[in-house]
Amino acid sequence: MSKARRYVVRGAKAAAGTMIAAATVAAMTAFAPTPSPTTRIAGVHQDLARAIALRQLTPEQAKRFEERILRQINDADT
């Protein structure tokens, strides 16, 4: 494997790992025992904003993930 190819593979693995880590933290925040769904949603939003700032997620990925988490929180609260 060429040196350039190894860097591409490593970069892809690192990007996937950071995305999974960011999603895991956001999910943990979403389902942590807190007083209200509003607090949980605010925590998820803050975590995703931090992940975007650190370039772990794109804004589009964060939006889709947040929408999915919001649906799950709303379903759990009903």
Image (cartoon, rainbow, N blue to C red):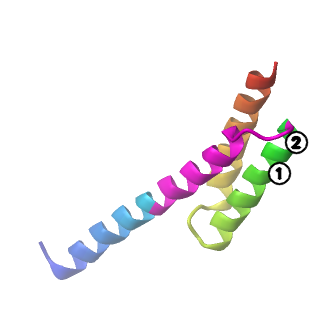
Q: Amino acid at mark 1?
A: Ala
x, y (%) of residue 41?
A: 80, 45
The secondary element bearing badge 2 is classed as helix
The furthest residue to the top: 78
The residue that appears at 73% across and 40% down in the rendered structure is 67
Identify residue for label 1.
42
Q: Which residues are magenta?
A: 18-36
Q: Which quadrant would the C terminus be assigned to in this image?
A: top right
Q: Tell which of 69 and 5 is nearer to you.
A: 69
Mark 2 = which residue?
38
Farthest residue in the left direction? 1
Q: For the residues marked 1 and 2, what is the alpha-carbon distance in whole angstroms?
A: 6 Å
Q: Which mark is residue 29?
A: none
Residue 48 is a magenta residue: no
Secondary structure type for disc 1: helix
Q: Is residue 68 above or below residue 50?
A: above
The spot of residue 40 in percent (x, y) is 79, 44
Q: Is residue 8 left or right of residue 27?
A: left
Magenta highlight on residue 25: yes
Task: Note whether 55 is above or below 76 in the view shown.
Answer: below
**Would you say 16 lies left or right of 30 here?**
left
Q: Quarter of the image for the N terminus: give it.
A: bottom left
Left or right, residue 50 beside residue 34: left
Mark 1 in CB contact with mark 2 (< 8 angstroms) = yes
Q: Residue at x 79, y 41 (%)?
A: 34
Crowd class of label 2 (few under 14; some 14 to 19; many from 20; radius 10 Å): few
- Tell me the residue at 56%/57% (across/down): 22
